[in-house]
Image: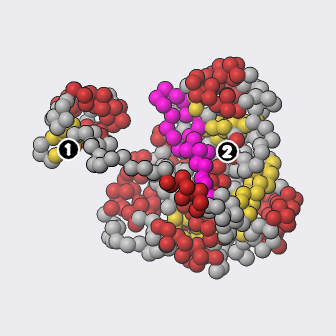
Amino acid sequence: MQQRSSVGELAEQLRRELDRYSPGGKLPSSRALVERFRVSPVTVSRALAQLAAEGLVVTRPGAGAFRARPHRPEGPAGDTSWQEVALSADGAADLVPRTVDASGVTVSLSVPPPGVLEFSGGYPHPSLQPERAMAAALARAGRRPGAWERPPLEGLPELREWFARGIGGAVTAAEVLIAAGGQAALATALRALAPPGAPVLVESPTYPGMLALARAAGLRPVPVPVDPDGVRPDLLADAFQATGARVFVCQPLFQNPTGAVLAPARRAEVLRIAREAGAFVVEDDFVRRLVHADAGPLPRPLAADDPDGVVVHVGSLTKATSPSFRVSALAARGPVLERLRAIQVVDSFFVPRPLQEAALELVGSPAWPRHLRALSAELKTRRDVMTGALARELPELVLPHVPTGGYHLWLRLPDGLDEAALTATALRAGVALTPGRPYFSAEPPAGHLRLSFAAVAGTGEITEGMRRLRAAYEEVR
């Protein structure tokens, strides 16, 4: 039997047909839906489950699926206007406003409308994810002895050991905590290292999700410019001296968004400057496993060359697997480790054990190195296709650096071109972009775009997306 519809497509079709049935009316049987839409029983079951989760249908074992009756709220609508006063008053004494602008994060998390090519995505396309290997790992994990018991609060010892080996140097499993994805690990680190109202040094430009985390914690992000060799040590030293900051957050490998790699000569300098300032360096090593096939040997994490506990290291499996495979590591040395552990336990108790067991099964399987090799080759191919298409279609956009890792390109717009107008026009033309403004904690020096080459289905969509982007550019320039 040829499967013609995905779960989402079938759910959408059934959703459009619900008006044919009165509330409480019975939908066709699963067998009838299988025959009509030429899909598998599993697809039908999942589509109905999706509609049930949306409250549109009710499924009754042995009886079938029925259109749900409309929900009628009890009593009059409430008045929530009082919250505007309460929330504003709550932050009146804050040194730094704690309102959160998540727009820079949601751009890379949101799924664009049908027909729109996703150059804004923050994760590899499902075709680049090891879906079969993850499914097999999860199935094996569920059969492991004790898989559904409480895990150690710090994480499974074998998984901590695996992350420690990946960091290298003298880092041991005892210095690693398992966290629920890189974003959660960064949030824990910021809360542990800086009190509300304190400055925190950040690369400029940098990942909007980290800026949002800092502001949500009441911290004040202070930008330190990045060039093609990473953060500038001279400006980092000046920023520490001027602000008295005790935390610097950086991405030394394939920095987001510039793709820069911290130069060998700067690595020791950054650690020395932080150590002399009595400060921590939070190392967000987020895409080490998204290296391109032509990258050559990678530098070790900063944490591997740090005997004094300056570096708090964050590493994650998520980017190389799936947005839902949220397993990461926090590594630190010295008294700060206990503070990190305490905050994480209070916030989330622990990462679910089945997910940790599945991570162990995945990284220990022969499929894991095969996946990384295939991903590496495909990312290079996509990067080359996008850079070639940019040179043909949009030579006006400046590409200062072609990365050898990660999943995107960082482009500077011509002076005077409206970044917001280009983004909006491109969306109407059928391509979703990520504007550069959210990557700056202060005024940006120019307009920028970040283009992801990993979130689309293949190289054909990259070529078509560049053609659409050219049309949008012609409209707004």
Among the 4 quarters of the image, the one containing residue 309 = bottom right
Q: Mark 1 to mark 2: distance in Å?
A: 44 Å
Residue pictured at 72% horizontal, 50% vertical: 441
Other residues around mark 2 within 10 Å, as few (<14) / some (14–19) / many (≥20): many
Dot 1 or dot 2: first in sequence order is 1
Residue 155 vs 415, above or below: the answer is below
Please give left or right for residue 84 compared with residue 228 in the image: left
Highlighted range, magenta: 98-121
Among the 4 quarters of the image, the one containing residue 117 = top right
> The N terminus is located in which quarter?
top left
Residue 22 marker: none
Residue 59 marker: 1
Q: Secondary structure at mark 2?
A: helix
Please give left or right for residue 346 compared with residue 142 in the image: right
Residue 250 vs 291, above or below: the answer is below
Q: Is residue 236 magenta?
A: no
Residue 173, x across and y down, in percent: 56, 74
Residue pictured at 29% horizontal, 49% vertical: 75
> The C terminus is located in which quarter?
top right
* Residue type, label 1: Thr
Which residue ends up furthest to the left in the rendered image? 62
Residue pictured at 49% horizontal, 72% vertical: 346
Residue 8, x across and y down, in percent: 36, 35
Specify whether residue 438 is in view: yes
Q: Secondary structure at mark 1?
A: strand
* Residue type, label 2: Pro
Residue 181, x across and y down, in percent: 52, 58
Q: Main secondary structure of the magenta part?
A: loop
Q: Badge 2 is on which residue? A: 438
